[in-house]
Amino acid sequence: MSKISLKPLGDRVLVQASAAETKTAGGIIIPDTAQEKPQKGKIVAVGNGKKDEPMTVKVGDSVLYGKYSGTEVSIEGKEYLIMRESDIFAIL
């Protein structure tokens, strides 16, 4: 993974979403239009946090987040999500 030149502000994090499932457990291939948006990913950049609330996640953490959390951004040809730390449900 290359170094990201983007630094999130405040309590925001930059997440690289995991790949969507392309096959069911039974082996059925899921078409692109029916694939669910992934809800887990890896933290690639973190902000400094708020004055009274330090960040609890760090670069490299695998996290679970809400289905509609974050804003999609494209950096150097790769897709990422930028979201608030409060949108993260759990660290895996």
Image: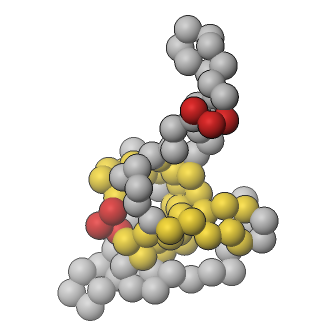
Q: Residue at x 36, y 79 (%)?
A: 11
- Tell me where residue 6 appears, x and y as whole percent: 63, 81
Is residue 58 at all visible to an observer of this figure?
A: no
Q: Residue at x 68, y 69 (%)?
A: 74
Nearest the eye: 65 or 45: 65
Give the position of the C terminus as an image quadrant: top left
Q: Residue at x 52, y 51 (%)?
A: 41
- Tell me where residue 64 appears, x and y as whole percent: 39, 48
Q: Residue furthest right?
A: 77
Q: Residue at x 62, y 70 (%)?
A: 73
Q: Is residue 17 above or below residue 34?
A: below
**How many numbered callouts?**
0
Q: Residue furthest left?
A: 52
| Colour scheme of the rendered structure | secondary structure
The part of the image, by quadrant, that contains residue 68 is: bottom left
Give the position of the N terminus as an image quadrant: bottom right
Is residue 54 at all visible to an observer of this figure?
A: yes
For residue 19, side relative to residue 83 (left or right): right
Nearest the eye: 81 or 44: 81
Nearest the eye: 32 or 64: 32
